[in-house]
Image: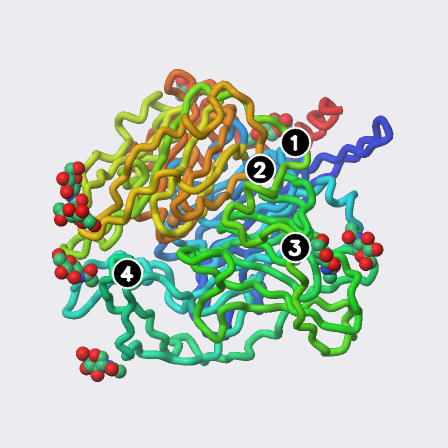
Amino acid sequence: MYIYLILIVYLYYANSFVECTFVEYDFIIRSIPANPDGYPRPVIIMHHANSSWDIDRPFPCPLIRAKLGDQLHIKVTNMLRDQPTAIHFHGLHMINNPWADGTVHITQCPIEPYETFIYEFNITQTGTYWYHSHNAQQYADGLLGPIILDHDTIEQRYDYGSNDYIVMLQEWYHETWPDLMTAYQGPYDAYRGNIPIYPWPPTSFLINGHGRFDCRVSDCTENATWRDTCGHRHRAQCIPLREPFLGRCNPDAHPVDDFVCQPGKFARFRVINAASGIPFRFWIDQHNLTIVARDGIEVSPVVLPHIHVAIGQRLDVIVNCSEDPAVKYVIFAASRNSYLSPEVITGPTPTMWTWAYLTYSKVSADRRAIQSVEEPKFDADDPFFEYKYLKPSNARFASPAIRRITLSFEVHWNNRSNIDALEEWAVNDITFEPPKEPLLHANFIDGTFKHCIADERSGRVNNSHATHIQHFEYGQTYEIVMINYDSQLHPWHLHGYSIDFIAAGKIPSLPPVTCNRTRREVHTFDYDTILPPLNSTPPVLSSGDSFTVPRDSYVVFRFTANNPGPWFLHCHMEWHIWPGMALVFSVERNGRYKGLVYSPPAESFTVCGTRKRTSAKLISNSSQTKVTPIILTFICTVTCFLRI
Ligand SMILES: *[C@@H]1O[C@H](CO)[C@@H](O)[C@H](O)[C@H]1NC(C)=O
Ligand SMILES: *[C@@H]1O[C@H](CO)[C@@H](O)[C@H](O)[C@H]1NC(C)=O
Ligand SMILES: *[C@@H]1O[C@H](CO)[C@@H](O)[C@H](O)[C@H]1NC(C)=O
Ligand SMILES: *[C@@H]1O[C@H](CO)[C@@H](O)[C@H](O)[C@H]1NC(C)=O
Ligand SMILES: *[C@@H]1O[C@H](CO)[C@@H](O)[C@H](O)[C@H]1NC(C)=O
Ligand SMILES: *[C@@H]1O[C@H](CO)[C@@H](O)[C@H](O)[C@H]1NC(C)=O
Ligand SMILES: *[C@@H]1O[C@H](CO)[C@@H](O)[C@H](O)[C@H]1NC(C)=O
Ligand SMILES: *[C@@H]1O[C@H](CO)[C@@H](O)[C@H](O)[C@H]1NC(C)=O
Ligand SMILES: *[C@@H]1O[C@H](CO)[C@@H](O)[C@H](O)[C@H]1NC(C)=O
Ligand SMILES: [Cu+2]
């Protein structure tokens, strides 16, 4: 029997219910034809093993819902014929349990076609999260879904009843990501006249997997050009639009979604930016939005007419259902361009936004309000908004740090060679190269990374290629200064932690753009002169796991290295991660994970890369034996009992 709720144990003690649940999911990943914006193309989805996918809305994939204290057991079977996979639970800490982080090359071997992997972890957080493939750009082809972890205090503070909504935002293309990456990373003049194609602009935008496309076609014959910052003209890159291979394009494939607001009550919108390359601006006509949580962490409420959401970030907003109930209000999700300032929305006109409706009841008149709310006292379009206004509701001071690490990043490019990529991204001049086997496995088994890190080699644009690892000693607090020398913003994400931001601003001494080099010349600036001393305890400006580093800016955070393991830190633009804009924060004691992290879960522990498959057995027999749900339920019950 496939049930995910095996048992709920209610224990009544000290006037409160304590529930503890063992939550089980069984998922299948496959590729199917779908038409999210009316244009049929293959998408990659995940569905419950006991039923079919939702034919009308195959993604976002099924909601994972649990609550504080639950034990999760998520079985994933890869039925893709040609691609490996792994599922990352974005924002979940996986304390002492990096085995469940789901990042290929870092914490696990890829789940090969027809293989199964089981993610086992305990819930230690509340709020809004999401999961997505962490193999190549696979999530941007559909393999993503929401996570709600119940029992936060927002439930008690606002009476929103069942008007609890997920809003997953994406941009969308009609080519699959392996093809888009070939176009982007392909060499100059691969054939006569060929230039690499950036995956921009997107073709349409999706709210919860639905959007609209007007079925236009374009063959890119207009000879459009653009001028770079040095005044040089370049031919504009174009992703041609064509008739679909898989069926007919239908601009009216899906009705516009309706979100219900009950008069006199509130509605909760869990806005998740699940895009592969763009920040989103989100607003509802004639309604203020009250931000109550950022990345699952409750913040002092901020009221404003529109919000900006970085890729990976989650903003929970409350809407007051107090307007004229006879009117249908438009909900907008608009595309921004990472190069341009936040107030500028951009994209493929006429569809540079997508929309849904906010209705007060199913029978309300189709009279549309198009009037925006007045601008607030503070600037919702401030590029540093999240650092200035999203204060944790329990105000805190950051811990003193023992060391400062500076990470500066930028793009390196060339246009000369017909074998090189056009662009490589680098952090401290290092373009990330995946290790030969997962870092977690290598260190746990051998106590070192020596044999698994990629052989270092120099790039052709004054960069080096290496498995970039920053080492942190377990239990210590560190300060990280991230410096963006690029003229576009980048959305970063750290696995395994929520981090405390203590400063952000424009780079004080900005090196000029040099037009005769393949990268910007980086001058060192002494951040000691503007940042609080390392041993001080400055107030925490904001706390989260997904954050924007605005163009030509720096962002400073502190974190206490209390969760052991190799945690990926990367730009969340899908076409920047694999060209190198990533590194690993490795939290160890004397260079090792063993003794800090739990043993690998025996059920799905496999090895790969340089390690011979036979050694898997040797390792896994020391860890737990296959536990049945009955035993787990028993353990869970005992744990609940001990907790109270
Ligand atoms: C299938 O399993 C899911 C959870 O894994 C459960 O919520 C759902 O009710 C099940 N559906 C059927 C038809 O059994
Ligand atoms: C989850 O919690 C249970 C009960 O406390 C514990 O036995 C188990 O080891 C934990 N598992 C993980 C992966 O944290
Ligand atoms: C674009 O340029 C090519 C080659 O220079 C030329 O043949 C073509 O006619 C131009 N197309 C348009 C629409 O101007
Ligand atoms: C939105 O908030 C602003 C500032 O708090 C307030 O002045 C305005 O009246 C509010 N508008 C609506 C429609 O609630
Ligand atoms: C919601 O709107 C009603 C009617 O305008 C108002 O009385 C109430 O104070 C508002 N609540 C919040 C929390 O803004
Ligand atoms: C590529 O580089 C050459 C010099 O190496 C230069 O003349 C040419 O304009 C460049 N082209 C582009 C598109 O940047
Ligand atoms: C590479 O670095 C060296 C030394 O810093 C410098 O002389 C050279 O101009 C750089 N080359 C390019 C292509 O940026
Ligand atoms: C590169 O350009 C800068 C100005 O942008 C100039 O000062 C410098 O001399 C040039 N360097 C070379 C090697 O041409
Ligand atoms: C695996 O089990 C065998 C037999 O029980 C034992 O001899 C061996 O030491 C175990 N291996 C590890 C790594 O614990
Ligand atoms: Cu980036």
32 lies above or below 619: below
Can you tell me whether the CB of the residue at mark 4 lies under 8 Å from the nearest atom of ligand 6?
A: yes
Label 4: few (<14), some (14–19) or many (≥20) C-alpha neighbours in 10 Å: few
Amino acid type shown at disc 2: Ser
**Quarter of the rendering containing residue 388:** top right
- Of the residues under marks 4 and 1, which one precedes in the sequence? 4
Task: Report the Cα–Cα distance between label 3 and label 1.
Answer: 23 Å
Amino acid type shown at disc 4: Asp
| Residue 564: image location, x then y, percent | 47, 25
- Residue 228's label in the rendered image is 4
Residue sitting at the far right: 15
- SS class, disc 2: strand
- Residue 505's label in the rendered image is none
Amino acid type shown at disc 1: Ala
Nearer the observer: mark 2 or 4; the answer is 4
Label 3: few (<14), some (14–19) or many (≥20) C-alpha neighbours in 10 Å: few
- Residue 542's label in the rendered image is 2
For mark 3, what is the residue? 376
| Residue 216: image location, x then y, percent | 42, 80
**Residue 161 seen anywhere in this rendered image of the structure:** yes
Residue contact between numbered discs 4 and 1, judged by CB atoms under 8 Å: no
Task: Report the Cα–Cα distance between label 4 and label 3.
Answer: 35 Å
